[in-house]
Amino acid sequence: MTHKIRRVFLILIVSLFAACSKPTTYVVKASVTSERGYGVVLYNLPITENDKYYSSADIQGDEIRINPMVPGEYDTYSVLPPFKNFEGAQLPNELILKYQYAILSECGISDRSFPLDPASNRPIPDSTTQFYTKYKCQHWKLLDDRIYTKTIDLRELNASDKMAALGTKNRSGNPIGVELILEFFDDGDVRARLENVTHNRWK
């Protein structure tokens, strides 16, 4: 009888670890790739009201302020919650974004650098373009001529292999997550892409 109890207890522990470590929803990240050091203000983005996801994002009521970052600085993405009513393993079919560009000043951190090489995490010195990383900016001067409303079709991303990998495990047994990355550029363009990430199964 004691052996059976221990076996049941072990199964429960293993199941608990599996449940805790298995990602169940995508993560939304945003970045601004700007040669001019612009910031972007997102208006009325339909996201879940859960503060635990926020990171490096300035939240002002219904506004979300996204700081510029040097391409390759993956740890400086603004992290946001999943979209409202789509908190699981599926994105909405489309996303309507309203956003405005701003000139940032009096920043606590402001650095202009070359994009980083993903392989070495070092600047690419022969790049012809430099980009800004800015944080803790006291003033956001909104640009009235740089307001955009764009619809992004997410159906292809929803049907992709990267989304299908959410919650599965790699060869090492670590669970695979997925990140939706929204990238804003100086010309007003915004692009959406998915990236798979590996989670530590013991955390």
Image (cartoon, grey):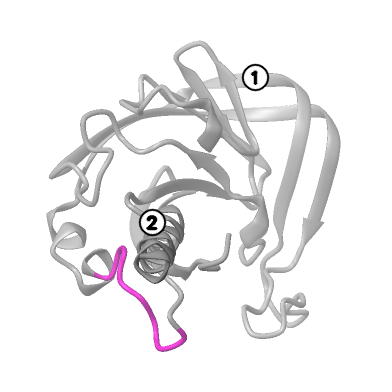
Q: What is the number of the mark on residue 23?
A: 2
Q: Provide the residue designation for mark 1.
A: 141
Residue 13, placed above or below residue 190: below
Q: Quadrant of the C terminus?
A: bottom right
Give the percent coordinates (x, y) of residue 174: 46, 75
Q: Residue at x 43, y 65 (%)?
A: 6
Q: Secondary structure at mark 2?
A: loop
User: Does label 1 or label 2 sit earlier along the sequence?
Assistant: 2
Give the percent coordinates (x, y) of residue 162: 28, 70
Residue 71, placed above or below residue 171: above
Q: Residue at x 54, y 33 (%)?
A: 52
The residue range painted magenta reads 165-172
Q: Residues within 10 Å of mark 2 (few under 14, many from 20)?
A: many
Residue flagged by tag 1: what amino acid is it? Lys
The one of 114 and 196 positioned closer to us in this rendering: 196
Q: Residue at x 34, y 67 (%)?
A: 4
Q: Secondary structure at mark 1?
A: strand
